[in-house]
Amino acid sequence: MIKAVYFDLDGTLVDSVRDIHLCLCTVLGRLGLEKFSVNEVKAMIGAGSKKMVELALLKNGIIDSCAQLEEVYFDFINEYSKKPTRLTSVYPGGIEVLNNLSEQGIRLAVCTNKPRATTDPVIKKLKLQKYFSIVCCGDEIPFQKPDGRHISHILKLMKLNSNQAVMIGDSKTDVEAANNAGVRSITVSYGYDDDVLNYPKLDLVVDNLKQVPGAIDEILSK
């Protein structure tokens, strides 16, 4: 029996890339650095905000500057946490599936590499906090997706076995984390990782969040 469902946030439950793009470009612009398109920023999302900032600096020719990385990262977090949802929305079917799963008594959690400082404002502004008993952010534990211990940590907090939970994500990072934790996964096809459908170890794929309950039923039938 599936007792819990864990959601990735960016690109899975919420479409946030335009706000991330806007905040990143604002910070880069202040420094006179090259800005990037929405699609270029989308390709940088997945491994956490600090990694995204590091990639943006590398693309600007800034290498091995830990001090500047920390400075730009801090500025980005500050900018994003103040203006988290100007252009962000829950994906179609998202609220419906959260209500559906909650009504079934399934416990819900967020498993994101996003830092706490920007995760909470997004969840709060979109009025999603009531659905999740646990929100586990990438800067609060020593291991992040694709490390399976990110998911295993939530399993431990919920006192569940790996066969009692499902991970829903949009990237190879999410799928690998689920596989490494021994948890089955559902991959959304509309997210930010354009190559995820070519990944050889996908369990199930859905084209929208309304299909999640049916995908869970399919997992249980196997």
Image (cartoon, rainbow, N blue to C red):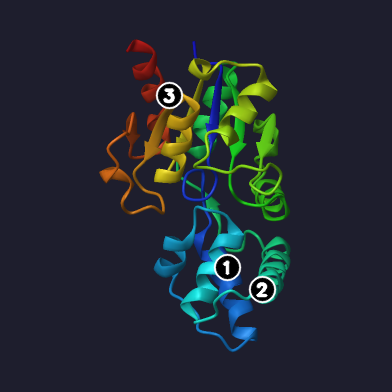
Q: Check contact, mark 2 vs mark 1: CB within 8 A.
A: yes
Tell me how many marks there are: 3
Q: Position of residue 68 (x, y in %)?
A: 67, 76
Q: Check contact, mark 3 vs mark 1: CB within 8 A.
A: no
Q: Which residue is mark 3?
A: 213
Judge by depth and name the residue closer to the eye, 101 or 42: 42
Q: Does 200 sit above or below residue 15?
A: above
Disc 2 marks a residue whose amino acid type is: Val
Tag in front: 3 or 1: 1
Give the SS element for disc 2. helix
**Residue 75 in the figure: left or right of residue 204:** right
Q: Position of residue 204 (x, y in %)?
A: 33, 30
Residue lying farthest to the front in this orientation: 64
Q: Which residue is mark 2?
A: 72
Give the SS element for disc 3. helix
Residue drawn at 52 percent across, 34 percent down:
148
Judge by depth and name the residue closer to the eye, 6 or 153: 153
Determine the image quadrant of residue 73: bottom right
Q: Does 151 sit above or below residue 116?
A: above
Residue drawn at 52 percent across, 50 percent down:
10
- How far apart marks 2 and 1 lie (CA) works out to 7 Å
Q: Position of residue 216 (x, y in %)?
A: 41, 21
Q: Which mark is residue 53?
A: 1
